[in-house]
Image (tube, helix red, strand yellow):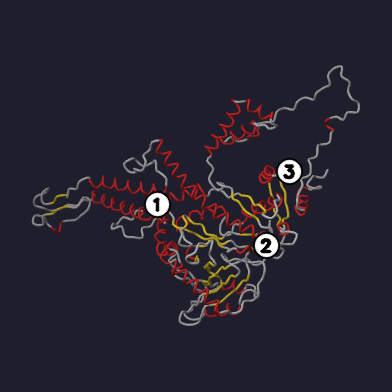
Amino acid sequence: MLRKTKPKKLPETGIESMNKPTPKPELDLDLLKEVEAHQTDSENYMGTLRDKWPDYESMLIAENRESMGTDSHIFDPRLSTIEIERTARVAAQRPSGKAFAVSKDDIGKNMIMELLLNYQIANANEQWDFLVKQMMLSFWSRVYGQIYTLVPWRVNPTYVGPEMFLISPWDSFPQPNVTMQDAEWFIQGHMLSINWLKKQNKETWNMDEINALSAEMKEGDGQEGDVRRHDNHNSYISSQMFPTQFGDKKYPKVKAFTEYRKGKWITWAPRINPKKGRAYLLRVVEDPYPEDFLPIVAKYAIPMFEGPTGIGPFQRGKSLQFGTNSLINLYFSGIRTSLFPEKMVNPDNVVMSSLKYGAAEQWFMQNPGQDVQVVQRGSESTSTFNNAYGMLISAMLNQAGTTDTSNSAQVESSLGKTPQALRLQAASQGAQDFWEQTMLESTLRQVFERWVALNTTELEADAAVRIFGSEIEKIKELYPEETEAFSDTSGKILISKKLFQTKKGDPIKFDYQIETGSTTKPNMDQEKTDVEDTLRLFAENPQIIEMMKMEGSGISMTELVKRVLTKKGQKDLDKIVIKSMEQPEQQPQEGMPMDPNAVPPEQMPPEMPPPPQYQDPDVSALAEQLFGGMGGVPQQ
């Protein structure tokens, strides 16, 4: 586990933390006006998109924002369900990948970086578990078209290392008119506790500004404890589920913003009273991030040319979803009319005061059956509904590249239900899944590029990384020449920043490549078929095995059988696939003399593996620490 001897205080949720204190910022009012203008420009730029976000959020909570013209309020959550299912397929597993040192092709340094990243993926659990955050990246980007994540370095008592913190779209203010790859700045909104601000490092934070902000919050109307939050920064879901803004006078919070630039971060709080005073410059951090990165990564559904935004299935399918809801509600209003039809009444022959509309009511009239008659309607409405509903659902499913085999052909009229049609639908769905998989993997690759850069620059204390069971087996499989010394089921290595530096002390640059498809839900049926086909190939063609032996290679039939049984869900494989009985010791043939100086086989010393060779002396020392003995060979 990564630990600091004296960990710093927990950072406020959603705001980055740095190891190195920076000088106390001077009160630069020109800088303050500049960042305020940036935030206003971004909010105006995103204004048209923000106006539409409540519609997309209403589709998630199955609520009709617009009047359907009826008393029914039925919502068909088909579009959101399709996208939830896509997320479950595309973002089902934590990612895996490889780090490659650019300056030196050293397998040892690559392996160490991968061990560290695997540990950090398992422990970077701020907000939610990493897998949950990965799924949210995928899903919410398809709701809004894009979503942004902060990639900070965290220092707290339980974890020291890089993180991935998802930013609400309502708190995201990107630079207008440029993509995130070319952006010079990005603004994130926070809700910061005044008490937390007062406890921060006085060398970094401007305590005069913080105290003045606290004092102004306490002025007037006794509202010093209220949470200060702009209405246009509050999501529709939040306003519907939590319409009352709760405040806490003992632990007041204030809305603040941080502008992340390349080389400088600025945190400020807007003016509380628009008629007097000014904004507060709370902090300025110089040179905070490695390799000229912004600490922000964007995940798009479909990127746009025009700027830092994207377009997703909720934007494309909104009219179809709302039209489907409206049609369903009109149809149910028609059903109510069929159950309680309109009646034509002759007022001259009916006692008007006796008319009561309801079950088992008694009316007084002169000519029963003539003075009151039911309005007759045809059955065209039902067929019209089926045709219109089928068209809408077909269009929605076609947009999503999927189908619904539970619907009849009268309702869902996309490609039919033949095996060939279903194969075409599967191919279309697979293509859209592949697009989302590519966009997600591109985002995660950018996240891990920043993680690697942070590891080479911010890792001040040794990182104690423990590896167990399956991880050791994986390392043995990938790097057998470097892990032969594993003799137990657990291990621990100490990783320091020095291991990722050149002899001059400069950070080594790494490339990171994510393994394609590593996040996708595995197709167990297809994997089982593939393994069975492989086993059948060698079982039916033993000459292939003989040819491989002639070339110095071979096939483990035992391993193939075990994999087939695993894919079939068999348990207790060690009881099913057992090792063969040991062969009896070979006795010398009769008449053959025995060598009196021969050493019995059981007393022969085990053959020692050759020590692994490393290019870097630091890696060689680490191998000795990890594996024991000289050069990684275990001591006797």
User: Is the residue 104 above or below the residue 460 in the image?
Assistant: above
User: Is the residue 270 above or below the residue 95 in the image?
Assistant: below
Residue position marked by numbered label 3 in the rendering: 481
Residue 607 point in image, percent of width and height: 81, 37
Kind of residue at badge 1 = Pro
User: Is the residue 594 above or below the residue 439 in the image?
Assistant: above
Residue position marked by numbered label 2 in the rendering: 457
Residue 27 point in image, percent of width and height: 59, 80
Q: Quadrant of the C terminus?
A: top right
Per the image, label 1 sits on a secondary structure element best described as: loop
Residue 149 point in image, percent of width and height: 54, 60
What distance separates the C-alpha of mark 3 from that of mark 2? 29 Å
Q: How many residues crowd mark 1 within 10 Å: few (<14), some (14–19), many (20+)?
A: some
Q: How many residues crowd mark 3 within 10 Å: few (<14), some (14–19), many (20+)?
A: some
Q: Is residue 417 left or right of residue 506?
A: left
Dot in front, 3 or 1: 3
